[in-house]
Amino acid sequence: MQTPAPFEYERATSVDGAIEALGRLGSEARVIAGGHSLLPMMKLRLASPEHLVDINDLDELSYIREQDGEVRIGALTRHVDLLESELLAERFPLFADAEHVIADPVVRNRGTIGGSLCQADAAEDLSAVCTAAKAQVVIRGADGERVVAMDDFHVGPYMTAVGDGELLTEVRVPVRAGAGSAHEKVERRAGDWAIAAASAAVWMDGGTIADAGIALAAVGLTTVHPSRAEELLRGKTPSDELFAQAGEIASSECSPTADGRGPVEYKRHLAGVLTQRALRRSAARAMNEEA
Amino acid sequence: MNVSMTVNGERVSHDVEPRMLLVHFIRETLGLKGTHWGCDTSNCGACVVLMDGEPVKSCTVLAAMCEGHEIRTVESLESDGELDPVQQGFHELHALQCGFCTPGMQMTARALLDRNPNPSDEEIRTAISGSICRCTGYKNIVGAVRWAAEHESTTRQEA
Amino acid sequence: MAVVENLPSPSAERPIGFGRLKRKEDERFIRGQGTYVDDIELPGMLHGAVLRSPYAHARIVSIDTSNALAHPNVAAVVTAKDLETLGLAWMPTISYDTQAVLAGDKVRFQGQEVAFVVATDKYSANDALSLIDVEYEPLPAVVDARTALDPDAPVIRDDKSGQRDNLATPLWEAGDEAATDRAFAEADTVVKRDIIYPRCHPAPLETCGMIADFNPKTGQLDIYNGNQAPHAHRTVYAHVAGLAEHMIRIRCQDIGGGFGNKVPVYPGYVCAIAASIVAGVPVKWVENRSENLLSTGFARDYIMHAEICSKDGKVTGLRVDTIADHGAFDSTAQPTKFPAGFFHIVCGSYDLEASHVKVKAVYTNKAPGGVAYRCSFRITEAVYLVERMVDALAREMKTDPIELRMRNFIPPEQFPYETTTGWTYDSGEYAKTMKVATEIAGYEDLRREQAEKRARGELMGIGVSFFTEGVGAGPRKHMDILGLSMNDGADLRVHPSGKAVVSISAQTQGQGHETTFAQIVAEELGVPPEDVEVRHGDTDRSPYGLGTYGSRSTPVSGGAVAVVSRKVRDKARLIAATMLETRPEDLAWEKGRWYVKGDPEQGAMIEEISERAYSGEPMPAGMEGGLDAQVIYDPPNLTYPYGAYIAVVDIDPDTAQVTVRRFIAVDDCGVRINPMVVDGQIHGGLAEGVGIALMELISFDSEGNCLNSSFMDYLIPTALECPDFELGETVTPCPHHPLGAKGVGESPNVGSPPAIVSAVIDALHETHGVEHIDMPCTPARVWAAMQGRPEPPQ
């Protein structure tokens, strides 16, 4: 097995302590939480940070709770906890949909939502989930906290709005009436990265769609947010034709690259199909027509 | 740096480099060779051990991260000369051939049964989907976990 | 038959002889107490690591090792220059080619070995790799085997004098071209296909590695290594290193899977040996997974053009033209006289009139290999081809694929059957086996279900394959590897206590030999399996033989153990006659005991006979004491296991994902020593077939960069992709094998990929007009086929 290059290591005992350490150590320091994005890269020597700040002791960052009209998720919450959360299952089932197909059950015992979002791999499912759910993230630095929308959080491939000396601490998902959501993913094999994935959320008002959220993974340089497809849906009645149209827009708005998982054409096709499927299930869940 | 943790019920404390992976700590520092490794990218599951009762891939955990935690390896399954029902099930159902994936599979199965004493075949397959076996085609492994679930309440078998 | 007290009593649970005996070797594995190469620590041991080329084809301009040597934990850095002084820079391959141990002039594949670091620990050894500075001058790479022989293709093996192109082995052919042309001329139906069996990799869970421990005081070289043919390796090292063979001891303890990946001698091994000889301390080298996928023996990579013809519903002719991609060095492992292995079995299980098959092997800038991964020496490629072609023919003739096969099987009365390419199949009742498969599958119901689903727009496919393969290489007059005949030995020693030790040449990598070979002795001698110790893997303590691959353990080593047990039994008879004061011909045998015919109470158990054999009591005239025997077994022929497989797949019409819903496998491997072990072997091979058919691929970009060098991109099925395999059996004993057994290890890998691919085509043919798709049937590739744009894999 391959092994990482040497580094210095310290353990944070508080969130402020972690931030202080990051500020002190500068750009050659990385946070390590679950480590299942960072350590593989370090073993392959694709990343060689000089310092690691271990935040696994920060229990105060591991929670899923409803507060002030939002579901708030601590950045250190593990994938397995997102999968098993009854609160999320009720409010935002797309989280569980995604978690069932993120990595494998053993990896899910360690990986965290914060780690996944900050890794910012375009194929990463939770980024799409949070974008579709209209989530915001809380970033804390030495100067205090700021709240950032998902669109502003994704800056580029493997790049987020979290700067040196800052820490992602929380994900906030607004709770509104009439919600239904779903995540659909196609992969070559269980545990693989998505060839393409689509997250969708709808908020129904009577029989019409008041608001919609759609986001795609693995079909662009970062998470793709086809807002034109969302616009199409607002004020309309759910129907297969409508969702197919939304799927076509989503498909045209993504920019996949060809790789071992598939060629451009196929990924684009999947983007449309999966958007349609995710919307169909979201609407069904919103109207209580699906388990 | 010094790391201290509990491994198979015993407190251990050693000086290691921060970059030492848990799998190497277990194998080289502690000399417990039952935990294996088979890949570079956290895919194969040969290295699975239990950390605070949950299966983790020890190739993707730093020894340093285990400070203060409890680690269990395959060597802890047998107790006082009696095999764990999971081990007995693997033997009964011919759920191993070359034996290389076996420790990781068994630890995963042990953790599954601790949480879910009566899993369905689908649940078993999902639980072990983070571990690759090249020899058995998984059918007998599923049977072995099922056997262990059914024989859990009887006293642990003779070694 | 008399019931005698103290005769060990068998039960279904604990048979004395053949039966579902649980494995003896499990004891250590379930406790995590196996001893694999990386588990072994020796005093003073150093750790090696290999620096590998990032380029597929490049001149080496310079290598600067000074920074690596300056690392405090580094003991040595070895390059080709150093090996040249030892005469070890190049080594022979199993196919009589040469392979660079460390690249000197050029690198010829991405991942090729360039330097070897020796350090105090593995972390330091890995660190030191990044301190070695190599300057390369990249050259254009040959990546497509189809263009490797173009006139302007760069010559890869310019190290070989007289080599002016990339031809690795001259054209090989079998069959009768003229007769085949006639069959095609007279045919009423002809189907042509271009079919690729892509490059894949055995990827056993334990990677390759070795500890070399040279003792400068005694001149003894001790090697700890997981390899499938320890005696052959010892002979190779003696040659290559100029050491006395009797001073080399190879110990293969537990091996975490082989599947052919652990047959070749790898440069890392030679480096470890050289380093140990020079340093005088043990040197351990264990590769990481990317090295395993990048540089060790891959499998398949056959690009085939095939034509099949029929007349009046009878399949009459087959012609196949193949380009074989052997990579940068020819290290394919097959018997010397068979440069395309046993590919000529491509004429299949059918009574053809004629066939003609050609194979041409080329060099490319890729890792060397080709014969591996349960291939039975290219039989996987051959069966894949013929079964895909028969399936295509059935479709063209609008005939059910099972019906077409039933009509064309070699009938039982024609066995032993000589094929159109010169093989003699030993025994078979093919239709019977096929029928069992259709019954287990509920074939009629499946076809009905398929029709109903199709009407609803759901895609379901049923694929069939029937294979005959040849294993158990092989008779010494035909088969050798590197001039070493493919015979195996067996030594059996029964101790005064009546317990026994049998030493064998076979080399288990999980196949259960510690149990199954004990069962053979038990079956022949009546000594319970728990009292038979099976010794293997240690060249000092086991008889010379060619090891385990090509499913040869049961046919050859199993034959040897049966024969040696019978020799011991015959000797026991003579001793018993003396003990019972009667003539040998007056004795009859029941398992474990010779007794007087007509007076069964008068007898002698094996333990009594063995005690007598070592005592001072009189022995038969002219006989030495002790109760042991030795044998070298020369198999008279290969054995020919066969099987009928049926796959059921569902395909998502929008995403093109393929799910293998059911897989039915009915194998006839002759007599089964341990049905539990046989079933396990089949399950494992079927899972590999699922992988090969759906997801396993080693591919390259146009510059020769390997795109699948980790388990993130070389995908192996998990428990979620494998169905609950449904097995059946028929038993048609092998007429020439002492036990009637044929061997089975590779059959499931041989038979399953064509069944799955045929099922995919079956699902898509009517609705989408799909006539062909190449493996792996990933969602992207299946979707492309559904759009009418199937593409071969890279």
Image (spheres, rainbow, N blue to C red):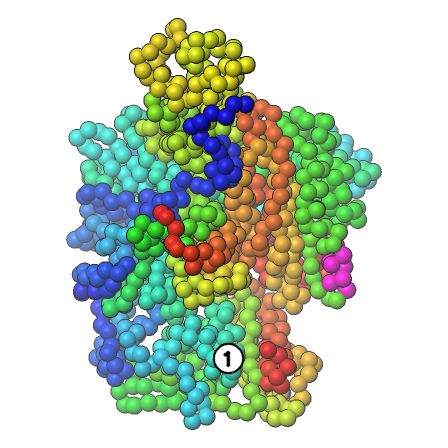
Query: What element does badge 1 sit on?
Result: helix
**Picture quarter with the N terminus of chain C:** top right
Where residue A39 sits: x, y (%)? Answer: 33, 65
Q: Would residue C680 be found to the left or right of residue C88 on screen? A: right
Out of C711 and A59, give the one closest to the viewer. A59
Where residue C376 sits: x, y (%)? Answer: 54, 37
Q: Would residue C69 be found to the left or right of residue C383 on screen? A: left
Q: Is residue B152 above or below residue C265?
A: below
- Determine the residue positioned at 51% across, 18% down: C600
- Determine the residue positioned at 41% across, 12% down: C579
Out of C689 and C768, give the one closest to the viewer. C689
- Determine the residue positioned at 31% across, 49% down: B81
Main secondary structure of the magenta stretch? helix
Q: Which residues are magenta?
A: C447-455
| Residue B113 seen in the figure | yes
- Tell me if mark 1 has few (under 14), some (14-19) or many (20+) residues whose alpha carbon lies within 10 angstroms of its own: some
Where residue B47 sits: x, y (%)? Answer: 36, 56
Q: Is residue C790 above or below residue C610?
A: below
**Picture quarter with the C terminus of chain C:** bottom right
In the image, residue C365 lies in the stretch drawn in magenta? no
Out of C388 and C224, give the one closest to the viewer. C224
- Determine the residue positioned at 24% across, 54% down: B30
Dividing the picture into quadrants, the one containing residue C130 is: bottom left
In the image, residue C450 lies in the stretch drawn in magenta? yes
| Residue C128 seen in the figure | no
Out of C675 and A193, give the one closest to the viewer. C675
In the rendered structure, which amino acid carries the disc numbered 1?
Ala
Residue of label 1: A89
Parent chain of label 1: A
